[in-house]
Image: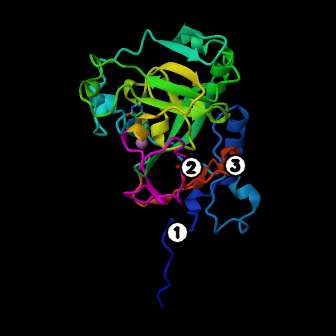
Amino acid sequence: MLIRKRRVGEGDILSSEITPYELYLDRRRFIAQGAAVGAVVLPSTLAGRVPGALYTQQVEEPTPYEDITTYNNFYEFGSQKGDPARYSGDFKPLPWSVVVDGECDNPGTLALEDLLQGHEVVERTYRLRCVEAWSMVIPWRGVRLRDVLLRAQPNSDARFVEMTTVLRPSEMPGQRHPMLPWPYVEGLRMDEAFNDLTLLATGIYGKDLLNQNGAPLRLVVPWKYGFKSVKSIVRIRFTREMPLNTWQEMAPHEYGFYANVNPDVDHPRWSQARERRIGEFRRRMTLAFNGYAEQVAHMYRGMDLTRWY
Ligand SMILES: Nc1nc2c(c(=O)[nH]1)N[C@H]1C(S)=C(S)[C@@H](COP(=O)(O)O)O[C@H]1N2
Ligand SMILES: [Mo]
């Protein structure tokens, strides 16, 4: 008799995904040193059937550096995945400075070194889930956005933070065409910006960011679709009003401000229930808040996430 196996991704956890105990201990040591912390990742059908310790950490293999640096979305260098690696060679990420302004008591223009100076450097491996339904696992290096924002002393009118990519058409061939309204803008609500997961990244795999990944400084908000993670930031502005982010401006029915990863709210033109991890063939289930619900879901309690997509 043929026993029908259930398909992977339909509520099953692959045995290869269950952390071997020794690896788990290694991982714990790694985490104790301030490294990667992924949230609990468990299909809801398994919840309650697996002993807690088994799924408190699920090791995920970081995506190869080669893939992270050649499969990119950075429309300033072109709209094809290979364009940013191919056409970002003329971009000069150094020297770099960032304007910090808006609703704060200590605004200024800071050289990159001064912006980062004195803040704890953290290394964290996060899943990145693109709204196009592919994902990667990226070992970031950076600082907490919160630390940088605190130094600017936001005032009580600061409810949002807007971040803007550099406008430099001479070095960014994509900006010579009105593909998007340049410069690229993104934003976070203040509590999102202050969440411990939120980073300003300066490196990947311990190396400085390459141009295609947003050198020298880019945002990382792992529970949101990748487009929130604005690259090559030159301005951080505190605002009273919700910023109009570039993709919302482009297509407000398809992209909102919050852009939390949500397998239950489909994009108007495709499902968000699953994703293809770069390097894998079978698709995985997409997790609520990209698997970081434990750290971030509380910020959205009481909000209708079908309205605030
Ligand atoms: N300035 C700018 N930032 C951007 C983008 C962009 O086109 N321009 N693309 C976004 C999208 S859609 C994704 S998925 C991530 C991709 O980051 P990565 O190429 O480092 O994986 O960058 C985001 N940040
Ligand atoms: Mo994306």
Q: Nearer the viewer, residue 133 or 121?
A: 133
Position of 139 relative to 209 (above/below): below
What is the three-letter code of the residue carrying label 1? Glu
Instruction: Give the labeled residue for mark 1.
Output: 10
Which residue appears at 62% of the width and 19% of the height? 103
Spatial distance from mark 1 to mark 2, Cα to Cα?
17 Å
Magenta stretch: give its range: 250-279
Is 290 displayed left or right of 2 in the figure?
right
Helix, strand, or loop for circle 2? Answer: helix
Spatial distance from mark 3 to mark 2, Cα to Cα?
11 Å
Q: Quadrant of residue 29?
A: top right
Q: Nearer the viewer, residue 271 or 14?
A: 271
**What percent of the width, then of the height, locates residue 180?**
32, 33
Residue 290: image tag: 2
Q: Answer yes or no: is residue 105 visible.
A: yes
Q: How many marks?
A: 3
Classed neighbour count for the residue bearing mark 1: other residues with Cα under 10 Å, few (<14), some (14–19), many (≥20) = few
Q: Which numbered disc, 1 or 2, marks the residue closer to the eye?
A: 2
Instruction: Give the labeled residue for mark 3.
Output: 294
Position of 7 relative to 193 (above/below): below
Is the C-beta separation of discs 1 and 2 under 8 Å?
no
Q: Main secondary structure of the magenta part?
A: loop
Spatial distance from mark 3 to mark 1, Cα to Cα?
22 Å
Is 55 displayed left or right of 207 in the figure?
right
Position of 165 relative to 295 (above/below): above
Which residue appears at 51% of the width and 45% of the height? 259
Asked if residue 270 lies in the magenta stretch, the reply is: yes
Q: Earlier in the sequence, mark 3 or mark 1?
A: 1
